[in-house]
Amino acid sequence: MTGYECDELLGAHCSLVVDDEIVAESAELVEQLESGVRESATLEADIHRMDGSRLRTESSFAVLSSDSTAGAWKVGVVRDISDRAKRERILRESEQKYRSLVESFPNGAVGLFDEDLRYTALGGELLGQLDISPDDSIGESIYDRYPDDIVSQIEPYFEAALDGESGSLEVEYSGRDLFVSITPVMDEDEVFSGMLLVQDITERREREHQLERRREQLAALNDLNSIVNDITETIIDQSTREKIEQTVCEALSSASAYEFAWLAEVDSTTDTIKPRIAAGTNGYEEQISISINPATPGSKGPGATAIREQEIQVIQNVFSDPSFEPWQDAAAEYGFNSVAAIPIIHEGTVYGVLGVYADRPNAFDSAEQGVISQLGEVVGHAIAATERKQALLSDELVELEFQIHDIFDAFDVPVKMSGTVSLNHTVQLGDDEFILYGTASSDTIDPLTRLVEVLPHWESITVRSEGTPTSFELRLADPPVLSAVASLGGYIERAIIEDTDLQLTVHLAPSTDVRQIIDLVESAYPHAEMRRRQQITCSHDRMPANQAWSLSDLTERQRAALKASYYTGFFAWPRETTGEEVAESLGIAPATFHQHLRNAERKVFDSLLSTGIQTVDK
């Protein structure tokens, strides 16, 4: 250890290899040994080697009693403790680093562990949040401290640190997201222990989740806007309700944001939702049963609620929402987590409900709900327009004839009327605004005028010509029966009031939900009695095919301008009314009226006079 030969050391003073301070300290310890104060002594000291280097050693010595008068023997053993000293130095430095880290990361936790994966030091504010006591944990191994699932995650990293490798991982513990960094404690190439640094990243992870969800929502919203725009452009050109519905379902099911879509209507005979069109469902719609009767168990879901309340219904997590419990097994089987049910409505008429399904929870945020709700309105408008066009072009119609006794009793008005009122023609101005052109016996005009003051949907009445009968123009706003019939593509064929009884004849397309109109009439007029329901065939003499086509090709405003002009005698000679008067009745400027009328005339004449290319025999 000294680098000297034994002969060089024998007889030499110990100051040859140790400092004077060590010589003095050892002499003091010997005195204590000789006086019996202590039985043995240990002294750590650096030995000065022959080559000038130093070596850390530990000297243990004692006094051996003897009968010799020469005094007691003193014996000592010197050991090389340089490795142990080095280890202790490294551990002291690690302890200092550990304390510095604890102070630098007040919201984290820092620990040291040995080769048995036992904690030798542990501290930090985070431990309190994790319900870990540092005093109780020091001396425990990770196998004592953590559950098996956590041990299986962190054990390889602890072992790797003792082999000199650093690593990090994220774990969930005690309801918090933690980032754990594990490193070896080394000097040169030798590993003395391991150190771990733990940080709480719960808030950061939640922010990342929120950002990710927001990115997903924005992507879904962009996709949905694109889909809705494409659907809107496409369904305008569709000729049937089935094609419109198929277009909508296929477009939604093919979008990356959604799994599948289906559209259903109410079966009034069973009070259940009956599928009409589906895309990508793999038969899901056939496996479930949905009732709209609130008294039945399967009526609390989004589809039935959307129809009853006529508002979009969204379930963001079908497995945690109790209203979706009857269909949770089906949701697990078909792989969706959230659902939106959109009522298909136009002017108060419910055509059905559209179901859209996504595989992720919280798929329908407020912005997405707003866009998809508009889709329901667009589809409802397209279906209504298609059915109106079909009603004009179709030879087959359903005719409903009602007899309504004491019609004014339904409105609790004191007006008494005797005579005949015939409502001959209807012009629709907007969604729920109408002008009726009719004739009345002279003694009924005053009672009709008084009705304007008491009936909520009668806005004004204008007498067009005096005489017998008297012609008049009646303006209505949101009349319950007329609005519903018009929204379904039907029309009032005949309406005659005899004294206080109304005879009403309604024509509807065969595909219309007739029961809906019957229920509405009976609800609006308690004394209503349906006299007849029959399928009829229109006469082509009454409505030639090209005429029907030309009228259906007009816009609503063009059709209103043309029909109002015709019914008020604008085309008669001499004219019975002026363009300014017709414009005033329609509530538009004269210039606007003439523009609509000219465009309507051009389309009608194009339809009537266009015969294709003619060849001339020269």
Image: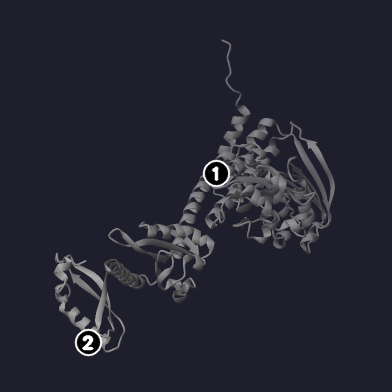
Q: Amino acid at mark 2?
A: Thr
Which residue in the protein does label 2 denote?
69
Q: Amino acid at mark 1?
A: Ala
Identify the residue at image location x=36%, y=61%: 183
Q: Is 221 left or right of 490, judged from the image as shown?
A: left
Q: Which residue is at the front of the view, 431 or 228?
A: 228
- Give the spatial CA distance, label 2 vs label 1: 108 Å
Q: Nearer the viewer's eye, disc 2 or disc 1?
A: 2
Q: Which residue is at the front of the view, 302 or 470?
A: 302
Identify the residue at image location x=26%, y=76%: 76
Farthest residue, direction front: 68
Image position of 549 with respect to 476: above or below: above
Which residue in the protein does label 1 denote?
255
Location of residue 557 (image quadrant) = top right
Asked whether the viewer can see residue 462, the reply is: no
Which type of secondary structure does the marked residue at label 2 adopt? loop
